[in-house]
Amino acid sequence: METFQLVAQATKQEQATFYKKTYLNLALGIVAFVILETIFLRIEPLVNFMLSLTQGYLWLVLLAGFMGITYVAQKMTNEGVSLSKQYTGYFLYIVAEALIFVPILYIAIYYTAGAELLTQAVVITASLFLGLTFIVFSTKADFSILRSVLTIGFFVAIGTIVAGMIFGFDLGLWFSVIMILLASGSILYNTYQIKNNFGTEQYVPAALSLFASLMLLFWYVLRLLMSRN
């Protein structure tokens, strides 16, 4: 039976190995996302199908399906299952993210400033992510207190999205700003959890949690920039 060792209680060398594996897997996840997105955006029937799902109640069905896949992927990457199953869950989540990003990226590329806007979104997202990561690792602040705030915030956000779909009102600029703040808080919280409450063999679920928060941040940064064009 494998022993469970917290990263916080591991040696410096073991911590370094864990962080290297975690952020390497995060980087590989981003590369896989870019490759999949490039392929998906070239498949016209898929693009048209995903765009059709953004209309009315179908968007709620798509979001429900995405949350279902998220739950399955996170369960598959739990510590205690085989490494191959963890990677399968991680890849499943990356595919789901790539699919749900098809409509917004298609609109961003072909109906707004295109490559320039995407570059701005990537730079802003990466800068925020690196800055937030630096804060966690360079301070002794306890970011576990964000859990309740994030839980309430995301429930309110989901309720607002559903209400917007049902009653047909635009979520507006400030909703994107608030979601960027929530996504930033999620990065702080997840990074803190990885640093203090994850085991040294949990680098795949650690990478998945960071990837999920990073993609959420990227989505709303991109949405905010699109609303200005």
Image (spheres, rainbow, N blue to C red):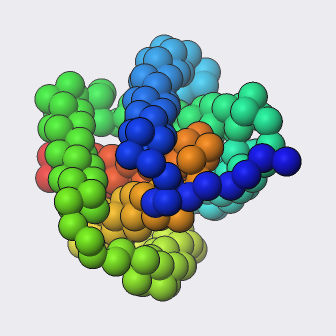
* Quadrant in the rendering for residue 99: top right
Residue 37 can be seen in this image: no
Seen from the viewer's position, the closer of residues 225 and 137 is: 137
Seen from the viewer's position, the closer of residues 101 and 45 is: 101
Relative height, residue 46 to residue 26 (above, below)? above
Please give the name of the residue rendered at 63% of the width and 37% of the height, measured from the top-left corner.
90
- As drawn, the residue found furthest toward the front would be 11
- As drawn, the residue found furthest toward the right would be 1
Q: Position of residue 80 (x, y in %)?
A: 78, 48
Residue 56 can be seen in this image: yes
Relative height, residue 14 to residue 57 (above, below)? above
* Quadrant in the rendering for residue 191: bottom left
Q: Position of residue 59 (x, y in %)?
A: 59, 55
Q: Position of residue 190 (x, y in %)?
A: 44, 61
Seen from the viewer's position, the closer of residues 57 and 105 is: 105
Please give the name of the residue rendered at 80% of the width and 43% of the height, measured from the top-left corner.
81
Seen from the viewer's position, the closer of residues 135 and 177 is: 135
Q: Is residue 40 left or right of residue 70?
A: left
Please give the name of the residue rendered at 23% of the width and 42% of the height, measured from the top-left corner.
126
How many marks are shown on the rendered structure?
0
